Amino acid sequence: MRLLLLSVLVLLISSCSSLQTKEDKKPNIIFIMSDDHASHAISAYGGIYDELAPTPNIDRLAAGGITFNNVFCTNAICGPSRACILTGKYSHVNGYYKNEGGGKFDSSQWTFPEELQKNGYETSMFGKWHLGSEPVGFNFFKYHNNKGQQGTYWNPVYNENGKQVVEKGYCTNLTTNFAINWLNSIRNKEKPFCMLLQYKAPHRNWFPDSQYVDIWENTDFLYPDTFNDDYTGRENTAGDTDMTMDFLNRKDMKRTPPEGLEGEELRRWENYGNNRGEAWLPEPGMTQREAREWKYQKYIKDYLACVRSVDDNIGRVLDYLDENGLADNTVAIYTSDQGFYLGDHGFFDKRFMYEESLRMPFLMKYPGKVAENTQNEDMITNIDFAPTLLDIAGVEVPENVQGRSFLPNLTGNKPADWPDAMYYHYYEFPFWHHVHPHYGIRTKRYKLIHFYHNQDIWEFYDLKADPEELNNAIDNPKYNDIIEDLKSRLKTLMAEAGNSMTIAEMDSITTTNFGALN
Ligand code: SGN
Ligand code: CA
């Protein structure tokens, strides 16, 4: 009898301790996301900037883990993409369609950080939130709360757990300081953690940190191949925006205002360039082409200098993990809320379903799980992030989450029925930048887009024959069958995603003012 009792006891203790170790092994998660960081401005992805402006620290994630080459945004604009990421659901399901007049994110709905918190994770969020409503599901948060929650590069105002605080310094450094401080001395170290570190940079108006102002003063950057796109065949879509170099304003170009200007007058002077008919020349006598090139050089240098600070600070975070014995049990991710045009098609900004803004960088270090220098080509979207993070944490994904975990794909085990097409939908118009609302489908090889608001224009691209999307082949009879098939696949995709809106209903999303952000 005593022997039996003893062995029951031993069994109990050993099963408890094995439970304990299982719990202990729950990986920590650091999800780093910046604002408007295009993958072609990350050296791990290559491109025309990688020699002059490499990103060695972001590249550490690629070298130590996996680089995803086909991650796409389902609605390429800030707040909406963030809402998709948090909920694992498309805009028409999470209700957050647009930034301008998009109202506030409904924070009573399910999000992945809240689910992780409920399942024993210590959670936090630092930097750009930009959803209007206060963050829910975090043990600690500190988000940019000035300039309509865009934040400012210098001396930003934050909301720290419900309290306004003005901080002195440069946003990217500050946000990282707060994050590291939380890792080091605020969080409950008995629990696994999930930290969202969301940089404001490199968002417009691209103010670099002091040591990086003018670092490339005597260097000229290369121009993207499509810089002089004349929008043939896309005159009323790509050719009808306010996001060409002409629309970079005086503040973007860091021009010094005349002395004595203040308040509204100063703002008007700085914002000059935003509207049609205001394409100003930086120097008198310049041609429009010279002005565009001049503006591109200033723009790309400031943008990449902002990226440099992001990269430095990611280095600080990765060093902290290394030096504090956390690296081996922490999944570190780097992404951006969408891509961006770096002079591609003559543009800055995002919004279009064209490659440069549709594509999101996504790199992940997952020690013990993913081999170094792995490349992945599977088609993934931003609604897949939430279920994947839950899966990593061993937490069940609720049925109504629309995205799908790509945890198996990390180790090359892509499920046989993994999607080979994605659905995109952008709703905001005309502010900012006058990009016509559109939806579409992208497969590995093709892309079909329908611009529907106050117009009825279809575009089709064969990405193999025309990777730069300069040739809208919608009327090329050679593609008739393919286009018909894509139209029907798009319909199916939208139906499966639960979007049964008529064009009139979609239009009303665009024209309805759902309220201000704050
Ligand atoms: C601001 C910018 C726009 C930018 C939007 C959306 N203008 O309004 O250029 O497209 O943010 O950006 S600015 O003059 O204020 O910089 S997003 O990241 O929030 O989607
Ligand atoms: Ca953004």
Image (cartoon, helix red, strand yellow):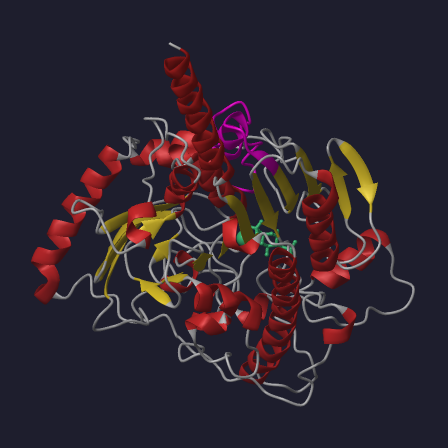
Task: Name the side, left or right, on which 260 lies relative to 31.
Answer: right
- Outermost residue on the right side: it is 260
Q: In this view of the protein, can residue 432 be seen by the observer?
A: no
Q: Quick check: 401 left or right of 211?
A: left
Give whichever of 108, 250 is nearer the camera. 108
Q: Quadrant of residue 447?
A: bottom left
Which of 485 and 151 lies nearest the eye of the viewer?
A: 151
Lateral position of residue 346 relative to residue 138, left or right: left
- On whether residue 113 falls in the magenta region, the answer is yes
| Residue 463 position within the rendered picture, expressed as x and y whole percent measured from the top left | 25, 67
Classified by dominant secondary structure, the portion drawn in magenta counts as: loop
Magenta segment boundaries in residue numbering: 96-123
At 61% from the left and 49% from the top, the residue drawn is 197
The residue located at (74%, 62%) in the rendering is 270
Q: Residue furthest top?
A: 1
Quarter of image, res 62? bottom left
The x and y percentages for residue 306 are: 65, 67
In the image shown, does 299 or 387 lie closer to the viewer?
Answer: 387
Q: Is residue 192 above or below residue 50?
A: above
- Quadrant where the N terminus sits is top left
Q: Is residue 404 magenta?
A: no
Towards the viewer: 329 or 41: 329
Which residue is drawn at the image coordinates 67% and 90% (left, top)? Answer: 218
